Amino acid sequence: YRAIMMNVSLFRWERALDLAVRYKSHVDTVLGHRQQFLRKFDRDETNSRFLQYSGNVEIDWDAINAKREKELEDEHSRAPRSYK
């Protein structure tokens, strides 16, 4: 998740989509952020890969946010406990 979001924040859309597709996770997250980015600049999608996946994936921000929260909780639970 972190690698995908790093690429999204760096506007490396192709790499973010590659990672999401390879790991079969967060494709909707990448597409949703790409959609927001294009909308902000009043642009239409022209990339054929994004068009291909956007036809098959529904952008549900509630689900995206829920997955994000779960990823953060999972990451937190894997972190080592600090000693006091």
Image (tube, rainbow, N blue to C red):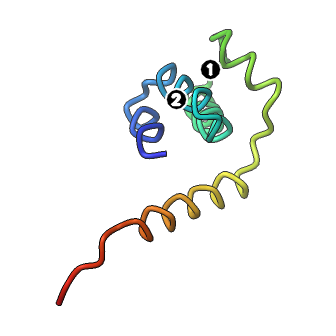
- Residue 71 bears which disc, if any? none
Classify residue 36 by image quadrant: top right
Tell me the SS state at disc 1. Answer: loop
Which residue is located at x 44 percent, y 71 percent? 77
Q: What's the residue type where badge 1 is placed?
A: Arg
Upstream in sequence: badge 1 or badge 2: 2
Q: How many marks?
A: 2
**Quarter the C terminus occupies:** bottom left
In front here: 60 or 81?
81
Which residue is located at x 75 percent, y 16 percent? 52
Which residue is located at x 46 percent, y 41 percent? 5
Tell me the SS state at disc 2. Answer: helix
Category of crowding for the residue at label 1, using alpha-carbon neighbours closer than 10 angstroms: few (below 14), some (14–19), many (at least 20): few
Q: Is residue 71 above or below residue 79?
A: above
In front here: 69 or 78?
78
Coordinates of residue 46 in the picture (x, y in percent) = 65, 10
Q: Is residue 77 left or right of residue 68?
A: left
- Residue 43 bears which disc, if any? 1
Cα separation, mark 1 vs mark 2, equals 24 Å
Q: What's the residue type where badge 2 is placed?
A: Leu
Q: Is residue 4 above or below residue 81?
A: above
Q: Find disc 2 in the rendering and name its residue.
A: 19
